[in-house]
Every structure is written in structure tokens, then in C-alpha cells.
Amino acid sequence: MAARNSSPMGWFRRGVIPAFLFSCAMAASAQAQESAHQIFDLINDCAKAKAIDDCRQYVTADSVALYDRFNKYGLSSCLPDDVTFVSEEKGKEQTTIRARTDVNGQLKYMRLVFSREEDQWKFDIPASLKRGMGEKWEQKVAMTEALYLAMQQQMGGKLDCNTARSLAK
């Protein structure tokens, strides 16, 4: 009797194989169907933990260079501690999430763009910056980055998050 139960047919009759196949199918389906809101939550968790390296996989291919540059400066400690989901505007290839955070006692709102890439939602940093800063976002980011680097050279370790945030305004 034990031999019959351990055979593949015994596993099939007891539902082990169908359950395993169903689990695999559901896991693959869940992976492909993740929402932009879920990716937002994952990235928010990384930011709260000051572990943004862990969320690099959740940004679009076009975002990786910006993401890596930001991370290289060690500014993850300057990310807001609490970014709250407010709403989302869903599209087929892009979803925009409206979120809010408190920066130095002042409530700030932002729109974050998530794009479909490789059948998964990913945070689209260039699209988000374009939406927030306009068509010339690249020049504005480059200017902010140059100011930050000059101040870092002048101030060294005295450059704090408040100073870095004021540059991004």
C-alpha cells in the first residue's frame, strides 16, 4: 500500500500533482499580474528600510542609470520615511500613482509613473521626472546634480539631507 501511495499515480489521485501544477500556474500568473500599486509598495518598503539596492529590479531599463547614480551618492537616507498611496490612474502600458509625503512638516504630493516592461509593472523614473519637471527635466536634473557635487566638495560630510532636498526644489 505504501508503494502505491508514493507512485506518481498515487500522487495524482490524492491531488498532489494537480495542486502543485495549480500552484505553479498561479505563482507565474501572480508574477505577471502584479499591479503598479504593489510595485509602489515594494519600493516604498525599500526606501523605509534605506535599502534601495533591493529594489533595483523594480525600475525600468531606462531608469537604471539614474537609479544607480542616485544610489552612488548615498542619498537613500534622504528618502522620505513615509510615502502614502493616494490614488492611481490606470492605463494599458502606463499607470500613474499619486502619492503624498511629509517633508519638514509640509505635505507634498507626487505623481509616479509605472510602465509595463517584460510583462511586469516597473517604476519609470524618466517618465516620472518628465511628468513632474517638464520637457527639460534632464537639464534640471543635471544642474541639480552639478550643484550637489559642488556643495559636497565644499562641505564634505556636513552636507545633510535638508540641504540636498532644497536643491531638488
Image (spheres, helix red, strand yellow):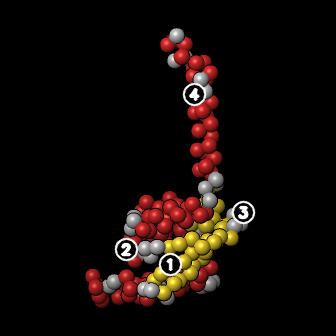
Q: Give the residue at mark 3.
A: 92
In the rendering, at what x and y percent does residue 113 appear? Answer: 61, 71
Q: Could you tell me which secondary element the residue under label 4 belongs to?
A: helix
Mark 3: give few (<14), some (14-19) or many (20+) Cα within 10 Å. few
Q: Is residue 1 above or below residue 17?
A: above
Q: Secondary structure at mark 3?
A: loop
Residue at 61% of width from left, 67% of height from top? 114
Amino acid type of the residue tagged 2 in the rendering: Ser
Measured as percent of width and height from the top left, residue 19 is found at: 60, 33
Residue visible at 59% across and 38% down? 23
Answer yes or no: is residue 126 visible: no
Q: Label 3 amino acid? A: Lys
Mark 2 vs 1: CB contact within 8 A: no
Q: Which residue is mark 2?
A: 77
For label 2, the SS is helix
**Could you say which quadrant of the image residue 52 lies in?**
bottom left
Which badge, 3 or 2, comes first in the chain's sequence? Answer: 2
Query: Which residue matches tag 1?
Result: 101
Q: Please, what is the three-letter code of the amino acid marked with disc 1?
A: Thr
Could you give the CA–CA distance between mark 2 and mark 4, rounded to whole angstroms?
A: 47 Å
**First in sequence: mark 2 or mark 4?**
4
Inspect the image, locate mark 4, and give the three-letter code of the amino acid beneath it: Val
Within 10 Å of the Cα at label 4, are there few (<14), some (14-19), or many (20+) other Cα atoms? some
